[in-house]
Image (cartoon, rainbow, N blue to C red):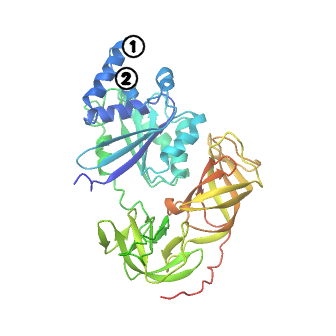
Amino acid sequence: MQNETEILRFTTAGSVDDGKSTLIGRLLHDSKSIFEDQWEEMERSADLAGGTEVNLANLTDGLRAEREQGITIDVAYRYFATPRRKFIIADTPGHVQYTRNMVTGASTANLALILIDARNGVVEQTRRHAYLSALLGIPHLVVCINKMDLVDFSEARYKEIHDQFMAVAPRLDVKDITFIPISALQGDNVVDASGNTPWYHGPTLLGHLEEVYIASDRSMKEFRFPVQWVIRPLTDEHHDYRGYAGQVAGGIVKPGDKIIVLPSGMRTTVQSINTLAGDLDEAFCPQSVSILLADDVDISRGDLICDIDNLPHIAKDHEANICWMHQSPMQLGRKYLIKQASNTSQMMVKQVIHHVNIDDLAFDTEVTGLKLNDVGRIAFKTSTPLAYDEYRKNRQTGGFIIIDPATNATVAAGMMRPPPRELPVPDFVDYAI
């Protein structure tokens, strides 16, 4: 039963000292997800530091520099489970200079926790992280108004911050936003309901994390299957087997379904869906399977197998939102590599359409490049046609990274937008069906 429990991935974000690491420490402690030896080590560390209480933030702030400065620098991952759900937490840094770390930690999250210090309200970093969470396609936001104990658990202050954030919300295009008043240090409304907030009638943080509905977050309409590997056992028993292995990135597939292979456009049908445990009657996102096709088709790593009635965009010219993640600034006209799903090809940035000023979410169209931690929109061209979906519809086929071919360093992460103009559907040649 534990293996079949649903997994929720969530990330924390917020301004410096808003209590992100402390909140995660409290969540782990109060949900009984800390081993005894871990807690004993925390108590010894508190004694050596001359403190009277255990610093819960040290459960996630593992770097020495993080503990010395009292800040989060790198992304820390923690895992815990309840009878209802498994959780993977990404504790991300709040400083502006670590924006790329935040983007990395949030890229696979189902939900984002945005922490706000009840004394300060919505600040620049709140808007920055809320915008980045929305840009990364995270469908659920939980706004935790923290340190309510320092404002005497004031309902009026809670409502004031609620209204401040909702004034920004229309720019985020996120449909599910939940507000919870908490005290991470004392544990109010984190795991157990607090008697200090009789005016609040919503769930606790853990209660919401256990109940939030994520099954519909993935695209289940358009079938997408990026081919990662061609399986040819070449044994006496399976001498003529040719299966295509990968993870279903969207939709559902069944034996007998008509499919198309992109970018070649060849068509065939699904003969069977294979796993080590046996054949399946259907496969759906995010299962990893091997697909056996009815015809011998020229397919290799990087190709995309799709539903024949719901084609993705196919083009060489693209627009995308990106976060630049390298010290070396972007260079227009330079050749980079783009890795999208399992496909890698050459690309060249033609134009920086705008740079996002995250302080006020305004667009600066006068820029000609992007530097470390900048967020903007670019136009680029690829050497071969890419088959992709808009990122907001499918994060697996719409997300990509940019690689410097000289150093193999990842220099940017991107999210595909609709094509610059509506292109005609390619006139593919029918293959055997």
Q: Reply above or below: 306 against 137.
A: below
**Quarter of the image holding residue 20?**
top left
Q: Which mark is residue 55?
A: 2
Q: Which residue is mark 1?
A: 49
Residue closest to the eye, 31 or 345: 345
Lateral position of residue 164 relative to residue 209, left or right: right
Is the residue under label 1 in contact with that under label 2 (CB below 8 Å)?
Answer: yes
Give the residue drawn at x 72%, y 43%: 329
Would residue 13 be visible to someone looking at this image?
A: yes
Residue closest to the eye, 224 or 229: 229
Residue 260 place in picture, x, y as percent: 51, 79
Would residue 168 be visible to someone looking at this image?
A: no
Amino acid on which the number 2 mark rests in the picture: Asn
Residue 139 place in picture, x, y as percent: 45, 54
Residue 146 place in picture, x, y as percent: 40, 32
The numbered mark, 2 or 1, whose residue comes first in the sequence reads 1
Q: Reply above or below: 385 against 269.
A: above
Residue closest to the eye, 244 or 377: 244
Lateral position of residue 187 relative to residue 95, left or right: left
Determine crowd level at label 2: few under 14, some 14-19, many 20+ residues with C-alpha closer than 10 A: some
Q: Which mark is residue 98?
A: none
Callout 2: helix, strand or loop?
loop
Amino acid on which the number 1 mark rests in the picture: Ala
